Amino acid sequence: MKVFKSVKSLKHDLSFIDKKYSIGLVPTMGALHEGHLSIVKKGKKENDFVIVSIFVNPTQFDNEEDLKKYPVTLDKDLKLLQEINCDFVFIPRVDEMYNSSIVANNFNFQGLDKVMEGTHRKGHFEGVGTIVNKFFKIINPNKAYFGEKDFQQLQIIKKLVEIKNLPIQIVACKIFREKDGLAMSSRNARLTTQQRKAAPLIYNTLLKSKEFFYKKDIKYIKDFVEMEFKNDDLLQLEYFEIADIKTLKPVININESENYRAFIAAFSGTIRLIDNMALN
Ligand code: AMP
């Protein structure tokens, strides 16, 4: 496994890879868990080379505190990646990715960024779009892998590739969960024992909303979820939405020929957790 800490050194080595070989890119912010590793293994299987980037991207954080406290476990991450035979790891510095101006570019994601995470985390998707676009330009991968855990992000990256007309296949990867259903996340490491015990409520209410999907109307399901969180002292619901998977617009009336997902964002203390589930 080769570790690159500068764009120049990565580009230099990539220039020696013959075009007949395929490259899969797995962008991450580090503090790797089983969910990340399963994506890397998939990338490894489907390509001749897999590159994992580890970069805590400042422009996608709308909250200074969240950025400062984002877990960094670089030595452990490298060990885990080595164990699964990752080919390349790219760990650039912030100043190299952004030069002197740490700002995001503007994109027209055609409304996909105007709902859910987009309304609650101002500028988040512009930051994500900016950094992923930079990685795409540097690496030029054949395929890039994104988790359904961040389903809105996944749809936005697909849109980015479409509007920029990039020859990159975006591969969606299913959500990895702990035994009690909590979606794996780097932020879970910051939960106290009590908070960790309470956190599967997010998964359990998603499961319930799936059960209710064809039996009850949307208002009933939303009221139910809100009440479940009101009754819990350790989790504060930020939003619950049922949305069309293509437009991400909240659904009012169900059309049986469309596909829907339920989305939740909730705070456990200051730690923000998100999850989602396919409903049909
Ligand atoms: P992050 O390091 O949180 O930016 O995540 C890097 C990539 O891993 C993103 O595409 C995430 O959607 C994906 N990911 C994170 N957690 C999970 C999970 N529990 N299951 C599947 N994919 C995940």
Image: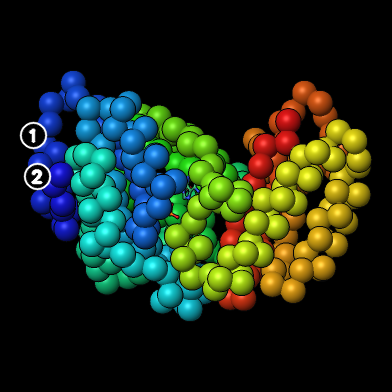
Amino acid tagged 1: Phe
Which element carries disc 2, helix, strand or loop? helix
User: Which labelled disc corresponds to residue 16?
Assistant: 1
Which element carries disc 1, helix, strand or loop? loop
In this view, which residue lies farthest toward the top? 20
**Residue beneath the point at 36% across and 44% down:** 37
Judge from the rendering whether residue 177 lies leftward or rightward of residue 5; answer left or right. Answer: right
User: From where the camera sits, is residue 8 visible?
Assistant: yes
Judge from the rendering whether residue 44 lies leftward or rightward of residue 87; answer left or right. Answer: right
Is residue 117 positioned above or below 65 on the image? above
Judge from the rendering whether residue 181 lies leftward or rightward of residue 9; answer left or right. Answer: right
Is residue 250 positioned above or below 124 on the image? above
Beta carbon at label 2 within 8 Å of ligand 1: no
**Residue beneath the point at 43% across and 34% down:** 170
Neighbours of disc 2 within 10 Å: few (<14), some (14-19), many (20+):
few
Quadrant (top left, top right, bottom left, bottom right) of the C terminus: top right
Classify residue 259 by image quadrant: top right
Is the Cβ of the residue at disc 1 closer than 8 Å to that at disc 2? Answer: yes
Classify residue 101 by image quadrant: bottom left
Q: Give the colour scheme shown.
A: rainbow
State the residue in front, 55 or 130.
55
**Residue beneath the point at 64% across and 47% down:** 276
Question: What residue would you read off at disc 2?
Answer: 12
Residue 249 percent coordinates (x, y)? 72, 44
Residue 46 percent coordinates (x, y)? 32, 26
Neighbours of disc 1 within 10 Å: few (<14), some (14-19), many (20+):
few
State the residue in front, 171 or 166.
171
